[in-house]
Image: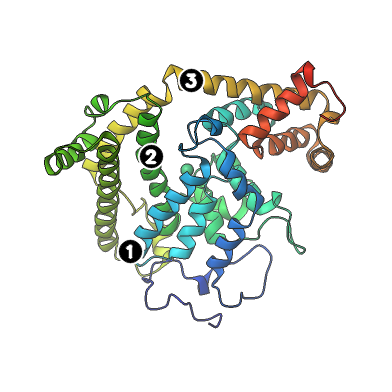
């Protein structure tokens, strides 16, 4: 393969991102051998430490609650699976889509959204904390593996996809990938579809985990149209399925219904827009990847159900509240005395202090905490606050 011809040529539509026409990397590199530029991005993500940490980070249920619950890693793999199917059908770049999907949650703190909310609160005086920006920070700066640069030096298209949302005040500081939030342009179709694959994955796997945990029941779910529709189809076809198979058959059909709707609706949007290039995609007033209006309504109903019955269930809330105490206590202890941080983390804080003063110190602490897995954060909390662990070895 030469650097002017994509291995995808002939399969990519004109408005797909093309690996031979990438906007490029922050640091110029030679063309990879036997891989395209987006394959290289994907491979760098899989080999980075932040990716491995996803295995021990909470999606909704903390990692040690049970071996079958989704973790950030298994969620990420489900997003990649859904996103790749859609990309292939639409003639978009599957490797780029996969790279974006695999990196999309790298910046999440331990303990899921509770951790993110707590860290954002701690960082309020220092510019706040957003997991999307943290994902970008990891791939651009924090991973330290390569001799010639910090970060993973990924292509613009992967970085743009990772930065799904961002406040305007932050976009101004992010250079090329922040630009579209200021000019109100759209990201690539590969980025758009990965974003929707993310919610397709979690809306469905959270039902599965919620039932397994005993927090929601099939009877309650029958009030949700998306679930009820597929429940009726499955029970009509199979009268005596056990509850495990019944639920799986329903959820796999729900994912399928959402994916088919997304592909059909987006194909129509794309045809109506008469696209001839990726620039045409970026110049659209609205995103072209979308669900139909009726699927959007059903999806909103499901999201509302999950919010009220699962995410705000007192047992989940109690767990997440406890997690936020851990994050809060760690942050304040480190800010109070940097010397209790491990050597590498304290050096990172000092480097940032030289550039940004006290804000830099807080950002260094935030990087350290955001990088923790659930179990590391719990152990670190024990080491610092449990008097029974008052020993040199801790
Ligand atoms: Mg996600």
Find residue 377 and report its image quarter.
top right
Q: Is residue 271 visible?
A: yes
Disc 1 element: helix
Q: Are marks 1 and 2 in contact (CB under 8 Å)?
A: no
The residue that mark 3 highlights is 317
Q: Are marks 2 and 3 in contact (CB under 8 Å)?
A: no
Residue plotted at (53% across, 35% down): 58
Mark 1 or mark 3, which is nearer the start of the sequence? 1
Mark 3 or mark 2, which is nearer the start of the sequence? 2
Residue plotted at (66% across, 28% down): 378
Mark 1 or 2: the one toward you: 2
* Way the structure is coloured: rainbow
The spot of residue 312 in percent (x, y) is 42, 21
Q: Toward the viewer: 308 or 189?
A: 308
Mark 1 residue CB less than 8 A from any atom of ligand 1: no
Find residue 389 and report its image quarter.
top right
The spot of residue 101 in percent (x, y) is 48, 53
Disc on res. 384: none
* 340 left or right, relative to 316: right
The residue that mark 1 highlights is 90
Instruction: Give above or below for 118 relative to 344.
Output: above
Residue plotted at (55% across, 73% down): 35
* 313 left or right, relative to 127: left
Between the C-alphas of marks 3 and 1, the distance is 40 Å
The residue that mark 2 highlights is 205
Mark 2 or 3: the one toward you: 2
Badge 2 crowding class, 10 Å Cα cut-off, few under 14, some 14 to 19, many 20 or more, is many
């Amino acid at each position: 393969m030469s650097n002017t011809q994509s291995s995808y040529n002939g399969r990519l539509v004109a408005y797909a991102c093309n690996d031979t026409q990438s906007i490029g990397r922050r640091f110029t590199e030679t063309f990879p051998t036997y891989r395209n530029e987006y394959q290289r991005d994907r491979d760098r993500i899989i080999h980075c430490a932040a990716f491995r940490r996803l295995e021990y980070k909470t999606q909704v249920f903390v990692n040690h609650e049970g071996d079958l619950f989704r973790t950030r890693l298994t969620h990420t793999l489900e997003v990649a699976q859904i996103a790749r199917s859609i990309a292939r059908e639409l003639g978009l770049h599957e490797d780029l889509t996969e790279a974006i999907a695999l990196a999309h949650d790298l910046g999440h703190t331990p303990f899921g959204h509770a951790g993110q909310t707590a860290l954002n609160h701690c960082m309020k005086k220092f510019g706040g904390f957003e997991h999307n920006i943290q994902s970008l920070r990891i791939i651009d700066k924090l991973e330290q593996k390569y001799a010639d640069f910090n970060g993973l030096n990924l292509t613009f298209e992967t970085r743009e996809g990772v930065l799904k949302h961002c406040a305007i005040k932050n976009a101004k500081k992010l250079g090329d990938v922040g630009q579209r939030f200021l000019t109100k342009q759209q990201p690539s179709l590969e980025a758009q579809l990965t974003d929707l694959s993310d919610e397709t994955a979690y809306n469905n796997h959270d039902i599965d985990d919620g039932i397994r945990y005993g927090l929601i029941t099939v009877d309650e779910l029958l009030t949700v149209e998306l679930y009820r529709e597929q429940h009726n189809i499955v029970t009509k076809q199979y009268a005596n399925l056990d509850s495990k198979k019944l639920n799986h058959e329903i959820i796999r059909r729900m994912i399928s219904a959402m994916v088919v709707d997304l592909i059909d609706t987006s194909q129509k949007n794309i045809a109506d827009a008469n696209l001839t290039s990726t620039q045409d995609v970026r110049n659209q007033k609205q995103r072209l990847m979308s669900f139909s209006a009726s699927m959007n309504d059903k999806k909103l109903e499901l999201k509302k159900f999950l919010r009220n019955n699962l995410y705000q269930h007192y047992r989940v809330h109690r767990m997440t509240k406890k997690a936020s105490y851990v994050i809060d206590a760690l942050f304040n202890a480190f800010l109070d005395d940097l010397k209790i941080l491990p050597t590498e983390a304290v050096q990172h804080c000092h480097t940032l202090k030289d550039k940004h003063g006290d804000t830099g110190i807080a950002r260094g602490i935030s990087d350290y905490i955001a990088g923790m897995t659930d179990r590391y954060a719990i152990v670190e909390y024990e080491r610092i606050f449990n008097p029974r662990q008052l020993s040199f070895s801790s």
